[in-house]
Amino acid sequence: MVILSRPSAMVLLLGAACALTPCTLLAQALPAKPSPATAAIEHGIQLLRGKDSAAAKLQFSQALKADPHSADAFTWRGIAENQLKQYAEAVRDFQSALRLAPN
């Protein structure tokens, strides 16, 4: 048993204890599952890092099937296409990304 000599310390401890409810602990323990588009983009980025631009492009295309309005997917697919020397396709994807997210 811990006895605190200051009331402010007791309030701090009680506040911290109250913040750790089973729901908040569960939310912290289980990360949110990414959307199919986000998962495909993340996989594609890993493939790009591994120098597999063709497979990465396929992942970004899958992301666009799941979310046709994903500026990130268009941008990343444009990067993969640029690496594959598919410049016209890359320009189209970059333009689509800019239309969707002009800032």
Image (tube, rainbow, N blue to C red):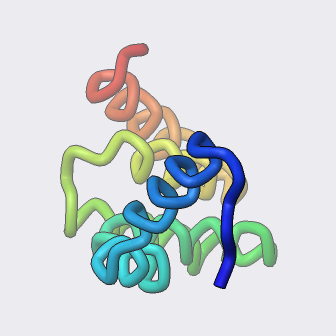
| Quarter of the image where one finds residue 47 | bottom right
Report the residue at 37% width, 83% height from top. Answer: 26
- Residue 11 appears in the picture as rendered: yes
Residue 71: percent from the left, percent from the top? 36, 40
| Quarter of the image where one finds residue 13 | bottom right
Closer to us: 85 or 63 = 63
- Residue 62 appears in the picture as rendered: no
30 w.r.t. 45: above or below? below
Report the residue at 60% width, 74% height from top. Answer: 54
Residue 80: percent from the left, percent from the top? 61, 57
Q: How many numbered circles does the render carry?
A: 0
Q: Which quadrant, please, contains the N terminus?
A: bottom right
| Quarter of the image where one finds residue 8 | top right
Task: Residue lying at the far right in this picture: please name it.
Answer: 50
Residue 86: percent from the left, percent from the top? 58, 51
Closer to us: 36 or 74 = 36
Q: Which quadrant, please, contains the C terminus?
A: top left
Residue 27: percent from the left, percent from the top? 37, 75
Report the residue at 41% width, 46% height from top. Answer: 74
Using residue 67 as the reference point, say whether residue 62 is left or right of it: right
Report the residue at 54% width, 69% height from top. Answer: 42
44 w.r.t. 100: above or below? below
77 w.r.t. 63: above or below? above
Using residue 24 as the reference point, say whether residue 2 is left or right of it: right
Task: Residue lying at the far top in this picture: please name it.
Answer: 103
Closer to us: 93 or 87 = 93
Using residue 83 as the reference point, say whether residue 28 is left or right of it: left
Closer to us: 72 or 30 = 30
59 w.r.t. 67: above or below? below
